Image (tube, rainbow, N blue to C red):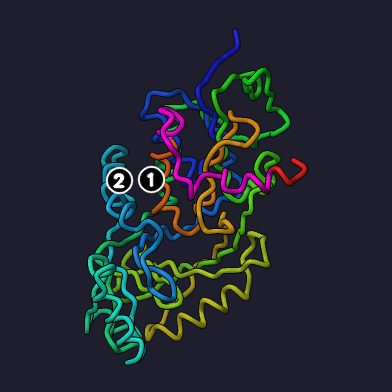
Amino acid sequence: MTQSIDYLIVGQGLAGSILAYEILKTGATLSIINDTNGECASKVAAGIFNPITGKRFVKTWHCDEIYPTIIPYYSRLEQELSFKFLHQNQIIRPISNIKEQNQLISLADDSENEKYIEFKSNITEIAAVTNMNFGAISTKIGGWVDVPTLLNILKKHLEKTTNYLNQIFNYELIEIKNDEIFYKEIKYKKIIFCEGNGALKNPYFNWLPFNTVKGEILNIDMDSALENYILLSGIFIVPITNEIYKVGATYNWANKSSEITKEGKNELELKLKKLLKNNYQIISQQAGIRPATIDRRPFVGLHPKYENIAIFNGLGTKGVSLAPYFAKEFTNFLIKGSQLNLEININRFSSLYLSSDF
């Protein structure tokens, strides 16, 4: 008899891991195929969740719906997996001059923002290490998730609870027969691709308008009192321990290799020296390709022609914030047939598929 498993997830980055965890909670059976030696942006992600972002310091997309769920979700996941990876830190944006101070105080006082951020005239630890002396904007909800640790812990959990295969997925081995889908002679209800940047080579979804961007980070050793804070000012500085910090990130749309570059290092160091008084030592440098999209919204849904082939991808730089919320929504869509948010549904780009050669 043909072996039958409910779902096959391809890729175990943050998107694939969280989606797999949510699907398993419904009682469905699952296979995972993941090339652990392949590129994965999640392995170098800073994992910051921040409700107010960008140069104009505005609420992030669907902030009011998504942000109240982030800390409860990862806190519960910590309890279920018996491991620590959630860090609640104030996210501090130091202010460099009076004009900027006036602008940001006004933003913090706005009724849309006041439950997320506040102005602080002085934070002793920040003033001691930065070159900016006009106070700071501080988040009331914020922090970071240790994504590499979370992925490792989830991998161990998924190896015990799913048919977990460490291998490269071969698209040519997909067989579709009378609305049924098979991979290596195993029948699935759906194959779900969570490949990150690998989707560009996926013959079923490479028509989607990805806008992948390379990012580089530094890991530095610095003696300071910033272990309770994340600094944001053109770059982020995230405390990994009381001496080790992650610094990033660059945005390069031209260079799509995963190799580190001297240009990336120089860019980050220039911004570091502008921001900090403290001396530091570079420990290492890393690079990854973020699976960003043309409209900065995730790519979720079913293939326009093959309803048993799906995608959950394109979470970009906000993966830690978006993955739990939309993994739950997509799981409900798959299991219960509930509606999928039109802003994330790949149907919004169906005209690109229809006008292509796919």
The part of the chain drawn in magenta is 331-353
* Residue 354 rendering spot, x and y as whole percentages: 70, 43
Q: Residue 345 magenta-drawn? A: yes
Cβ–Cβ under 8 Å for marks 1 and 2: yes
Badge 2: how crowded within 10 Å, few (<14), some, or many (20+)? Answer: few
Describe the element under mark 2 as helix, strand or loop.
Answer: helix
Between 114 and 242, which is closer to the camera in this rendering? 114
Q: Residue at x 65, y 33 (%)?
A: 305
Q: Residue at x 27, y 73 (%)?
A: 138
The circle drawn on residue 73 is 2
Say whether disc 1 or disc 2 marks the residue closer to the N-terminus: 2
Q: Quadrant of the C terminus?
A: top right
In the figure, residue 19 lies in which quadrant? top left
Residue type at tag 1: Pro
* Residue 335 rendering spot, x and y as whole percentages: 43, 28
* Residue 21 rendering spot, x and y as whole percentages: 40, 35
Distance from disc 1 to disc 2, alpha carbons, whole Å, reads 7 Å
Is residue 295 in view from this perspective? yes
Q: Quadrant of the N terminus?
A: top right
Residue type at tag 2: Tyr
Between 243 and 320, which is closer to the camera in this rendering? 320
